[in-house]
Amino acid sequence: MVAEPAVRSGFALWFTGLPSSGKTTVAEKVCGMLSERGVTAALLDSGKLRKVLTPRPLYTDEERDWFYGVLVYLAEHLTESGVNVAICATAPRRYYRATARLHIERFAEVFVDCPEAICRSRDPKGLWKKADRGEIRNLPGAGVCYEKPSLPEIHVETGRSAVADEACAVLRGLEVLGFIDRVHRGVRKRSSDGKVIFL
């Protein structure tokens, strides 16, 4: 009896950054570009998961510990089954992301770096405004300290470039890490008669 080949574990990318920094926007673009290469990735968006897991969130330390523990559990089991995962979650404490790193074999932290002023100007969910009015007292970056990654595998600055450029930077990082195959980027040159393009 021939044993079935072992399933190669998937990789997990944790997109972390301040609220409204563009984590989900960049992650969605990355997943789309991966799909174009024939690489699938499941998107675990904390905003959508909270609606199911904590429909009336309190954002207490205890609730955050539980929620991010569940998030790590889901990502760990998906990757063990060969599924690639993109996690979009602020996870204000480094401890949350470090826990994922310990449990997931192929893991990379993506720091979605954006100045607070730009995050405040975006504010699609109105979280920063609520924090300013005192309606939210534990928003990461306002009432709660956001602990930036110390040594992220990938670092993108969303206040300076287009989403497509940021997603390309993430893919280049994945190539360097060996998580995806490199794409040959040859220089295009035309023949003297202009009919043939050499790569």
Image (tube, rainbow, N blue to C red):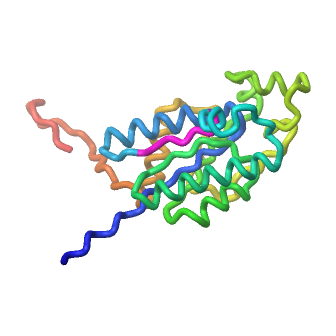
Viewer-closest of 115 and 30: 30
Percent x, y for residue 39?
35, 47
Residue 7 in the image, given as x and y percentages of width and height: 35, 64
Write the residue at 61% across / 50% down.
71
Q: Which contiguous range is marked in magenta?
A: 41-47
Name the spot of residue 38 as percent of width and height, x first.
Answer: 30, 44
- Left or right of 27? Residue 123 is right
The C terminus, quarter of image: top left
As for residue 42 lying within the magenta part, the answer is: yes
Comparing 6 with 24, the one in front is 6
Q: Is residue 52 above or below residue 66?
A: above
Q: Is residue 159 above or below residue 87?
A: above
Report whether 162 appears left or right of 54: left
Q: Residue at x 44, y 51 (%)?
A: 84
- Which residue lies at the image location 77% right of the left edge and 28% below the top edge? 117
| Residue at x 66%, y 41% (from the top left corner) | 113
Q: Is residue 109 above or below residue 131?
A: below
Left or right of residue 150, residue 39 in this image: left
Percent x, y for residue 140? 79, 40
Judged left or right of residue 90, residue 167 is left
Q: Is residue 83 magenta?
A: no
Whether residue 69 is situated above or below residue 5 in the rendered picture:
above
Q: In front here: 113 or 78?
A: 78
Q: Residue furthest right?
A: 134
Which quadrant is home to the N terminus? Answer: bottom left
The mark tally for this picture is: 0
Residue farthest along the front direction in this orientation: 1
- Please tell me which residue lies in front, 101 or 71: 71
